């Protein structure tokens, strides 16, 4: 095995378990709409947003507000987008110490480390504040490459960027977006990251799904 690719959110980074993050008003309230209307818009536009249809957070918020009939002014929408971008920068700037230790142990074994993430433009923008930058290469964000998990193309692209075959790489993720099945479909060895979110996932492979319940468990599972 030559490389380990990680999902980013709820695998290497999460704000859900951090008590130092202040609660914010619900997303739909900040955009002057109802939860039902906001969820309907997201259901219809999520894939497009994740592969780069909207060039930035402001464009996405503007489209949503127009579609749902939000009373926000253009200035209000700009302020909401700026606040959201600042929030994402804060989220990506905070990484638990155990994550750094785990990645260093993996790199010490001679394995390349990369990230494959479904991400929005503001998350790509916020990546420049993330202290993980020096420990991972490459980083493949869906909105930057125009394809998202679980499409096999995004996994194959990431492997090609470090010159490894999918069969020579691990993929580690919490299991959102059916990413574990997607990685397994191209021949990657899959490990579910259950340390932040212990979710049930569909798994149709004949071999059992390997799960890491603690961050510290992962290096020993790479065997």
Image (tube, rainbow, N blue to C red):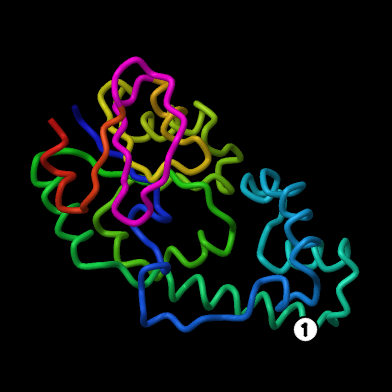
In the picture, the quarter occupied by the C terminus is top left
Residue 107 drawn at (x, y percent):
15, 46
Q: Badge 1 local density, few (<14 within 10 Å), some, or many (20+)? A: some
Q: State yes or no: residue 192 in magenta.
A: yes
Question: Residue 174's image quarter?
Answer: top left
In the displayed structure, 148 sits above or below 216; it is: above
208 with respect to 10 (left or right): left
Does 172 appear above or below 206? Answer: below
Q: Position of residue 151 (x, y in %)?
A: 54, 30
Badge 1 marks a residue whose secondary structure is helix
Is-magenta flag for residue 129?
no
| Magenta region, main secondary structure | loop
Residue identifier under label 1 = 76
- Whole-percent x, y for residue 51 in the image: 63, 44
Residue 161 against residue 7 in the figure, above or below:
above
Q: Which stretch appears magenta?
A: 187-208
């Amino acid at each position: 095995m030559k490389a380990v690719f990680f999902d980013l959110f709820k695998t290497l980074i999460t704000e859900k378990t951090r008590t130092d993050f202040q609660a914010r008003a619900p997303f739909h309230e900040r955009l002057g709409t109802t939860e039902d209307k906001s969820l309907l818009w997201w259901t219809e536009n999520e894939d497009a947003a994740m592969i780069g249809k909207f060039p930035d957070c402001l464009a996405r918020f503007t489209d949503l507000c127009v579609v749902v009939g939000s009373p926000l002014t253009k200035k209000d929408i700009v302020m909401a987008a700026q606040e959201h971008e600042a929030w994402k920068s804060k989220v990506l700037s905070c990484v638990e110490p155990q994550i750094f230790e785990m990645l260093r142990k993996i790199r010490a074994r001679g394995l390349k480390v990369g990230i494959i993430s479904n991400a929005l433009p503001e998350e790509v923008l916020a990546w420049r504040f993330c202290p993980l930058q020096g420990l991972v290469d490459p980083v493949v964000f869906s909105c930057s490459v125009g394809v998202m998990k679980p499409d096999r193309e995004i996994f194959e692209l990431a492997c090609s960027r470090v010159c490894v075959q999918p069969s020579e790489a691990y993929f580690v993720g919490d299991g959102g977006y059916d990413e574990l099945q997607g990685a397994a479909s191209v021949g990657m060895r899959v490990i579910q990251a259950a340390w932040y979110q212990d979710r049930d996932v569909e798994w149709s492979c004949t071999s059992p799904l390997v799960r890491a319940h603690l961050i510290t468990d992962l290096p020993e599972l790479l065997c």
